[in-house]
Image (tube, helix red, strand yellow):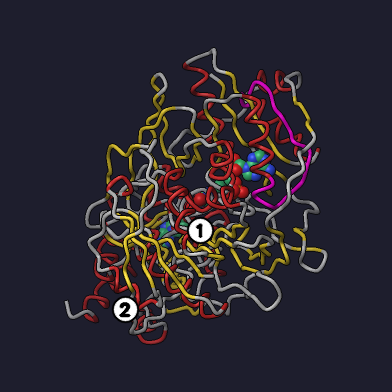
Amino acid sequence: MKILVCISKTPDTTAKIAFADNNTKFAADGVQWIINPYDEWYALVRAIELKEKDPSTIIHLINVGGADADPIIRKALALGGDEAIRVNTDSTDSFTIASQIANVAREGGYELIFTGKETIDYNGSSIGGMVAELLDMPFVSLATKFELAGNMATITREIEGGEEVAEVNIPVVVSCQKGMAEQRIPNMKGIMGARTKPLKVVEPAAVEALTSIERFELPPAKAGVKLVSPDNPEELVRLLHEEAKLF
Amino acid sequence: MSVLIYIDQAEGQIKKSSFEAASYGAKLAEQTGTTAEALVLGNVSDDLSALGKYGIKKVHHVADAQLDHLDAQLFIKVIAEAAAASQADIIVLSANVNGKAIAPGLSARLKSGLVAGAVALPDTSNGFVVKKGVFSGKAFANIRINSPIKIISLTPNAFTPVLGEGVAEVAPFTATIEAPKVKVTATNKVKGQIPLSEAELVISGGRGLKGPENWGMIEELAQLLGAATACSRAVADAHWRPHHEHVGQTGGSIAPNLYFAVGISGAIQHLAGVNRSKTIVVINKDPEAPFFKAADYGIVGDAFEVMPKIIEAVKKLKGK
Ligand SMILES: Cc1cc2nc3c(=O)[nH]c(=O)nc-3n(C[C@H](O)[C@H](O)[C@H](O)COP(=O)(O)OP(=O)(O)OC[C@H]3O[C@@H](n4cnc5c(N)ncnc54)[C@H](O)[C@@H]3O)c2cc1C
Ligand SMILES: Nc1ncnc2c1ncn2[C@@H]1O[C@H](COP(=O)(O)O)[C@@H](O)[C@H]1O
């Protein structure tokens, strides 16, 4: 079986969020880049677990991005992918990214395509659904569990206030979130091995972007906290009732 | 031309987030001088003409049991057909769980730009620019859609519905329905609880509560206020609370009217999931807890002393 795992590069969760060039670009100076947590902890690790169960499984990683993504791709390979493909283009348009992934996937004949639930920078939650449609494959989003028996995948996904279990035949595109797997740390053998695993760089196909970022803005600063004495918590209830009118 | 709003339902009932999308779509139709039409899929028990109150003029209803559960591929095809039939140039959905599954594929199918997770009406003074949250609530981006058809998914709880008097015309819509490839075999809902993603009030606990046995006060306050319960990742990881309650960068992202945090430090990754809440209240015994910087109201004190008094005061207020 062949699995494609979509890996994106995002700023570290503690990175300071600031913008440059008249608020048109993320100020990346000094920012540490990581594998998007959903891609690493859930999508990739679940794929690795499937390979551990069936060693004939092949895991390919894909990233759409510039050469500055190579370190995080290497880290993903250290965790467990067999080989990686980087489509050499930088874009913030989901449709462009998804089209590049779909082009590679079409050639590769994957039975499973895993993405993270969303990127923690652009929060589109979009790439997986777009890739599925472009490939005319079923899409199951926000998955918390994934089991495979023969060609039949049994997937648990989030719904409002609970979960739903769905069955679908592979091939399928799945977006992964908490519950799918547990975070892993790459070991020395993995890190050494990753150096010699293939990281193929391919040039992008021409795709017209459907959206463009006009400008970023930061939320208005909070007015500051109104503190209530711990001896008089009743006052907090009064404020929430009368001033904030919350209940 | 029209604005087509996809109305999402579960077990025959329209979701709150879809009423928000309906009202948002109707306002957008007003803004662009077109009409707002809605699309409902599957069997529903709600009176669909009541969508008129949200500004919807016409409701297209495909009452087919194969659409009672989500198969994104199938839903996308049906919505695309309805969009073509009503000549929609704008399609609005809620960015709720189903919207996240449908909107991207619809965008790819129609080659139409999507802004996922909009938080405000578009600026149409010069093209079509929609504001959405990015960097997990730490910033916003204004995104221009360049395609002729525009698709917007609206963040739940970001837009307050405006209610009027109208009654919508309800008409059956005939679409090509293929057998769904994704078959739902079981649904497990936490009974009697308010889904976190739809809740207006949320009471949340962190590791400061010391153990799962102390969650009674969180649950009692939530029950009194009709609030949902949430927790920090540390708490979910320790299995004190179920995973679906975990909010933050790697958990759920919510924007309720009230987020009431007890014994949570307010780590940046926690804030990422809750900082769009309209009012944040923090109870923490450490005056240096980072959460106070993001809070509107707070008490520096011991939760075990403060919470019982808060519960008593709420009981009194509610006449219980
Ligand atoms: C990549 C990454 C992603 C992450 N994602 C998330 C996420 O999605 N969500 C999330 O929550 N965290 C996330 N974290 C973890 C986060 O950094 C914190 O470790 C976590 O939020 C801490 O949980 P806590 O506040 O409950 O516990 P603690 O940090 O232990 O804080 C407990 C707080 O309770 C207070 N306290 C103690 N006793 C009392 C008392 N009697 N009365 C009142 N207050 C008391 C303490 O002063 C303290 O502030 C992530 C971390 C990383 C690295
Ligand atoms: N540039 C990219 N290259 C490869 N995969 C990506 C890229 N951007 C996003 N993805 C994948 O798509 C998922 C959803 O991203 P998004 O739609 O941007 O929230 C991510 O969790 C990744 O798995």
Q: Identify the residue under disc 2.
A: B167
Which quadrant does the N terminus of chain B fall into?
bottom right
Say whether residue A136 is magenta: no
In percent of width and height, residue B79 lies at: 45, 54
Q: Identify the residue under disc 1.
A: B84
Instruction: Using the image as rendered, state which of residue B8 and residue A59 is in the foreground.
Output: B8
In percent of width and height, residue B104 lies at: 55, 50
Do callouts 2 and 1 point to residues on the same chain?
A: yes
Which quadrant does the C terminus of chain B fall into?
bottom left
Q: Residues within 10 Å of mark 1 (few under 14, many from 20)?
A: few
How far apart in space, not on screen, are marks 2 and 1 (Cα)?
24 Å
Q: Give residue B56's mark.
A: none
Q: Quadrant of residue B180?
A: top left
Q: Which chain hosts label 1? A: B
Q: Quadrant of ligand 2?
A: top right
- In this view, the mark in front (2 or 1): 1
Q: Is residue A19 left or right of residue A112?
A: right
Q: Residue furthest top?
A: A56
- The stretch of residues the image draws in magenta is A79-96
The amino acid on which the numbered mark 1 sits, given as a three-letter code, is Ala
In percent of width and height, residue A243 lies at: 41, 86
Instruction: Using the image as rendered, state which of residue B253 and residue B91 is in the foreground.
Output: B91
The amino acid on which the numbered mark 2 sits, given as a three-letter code, is Val
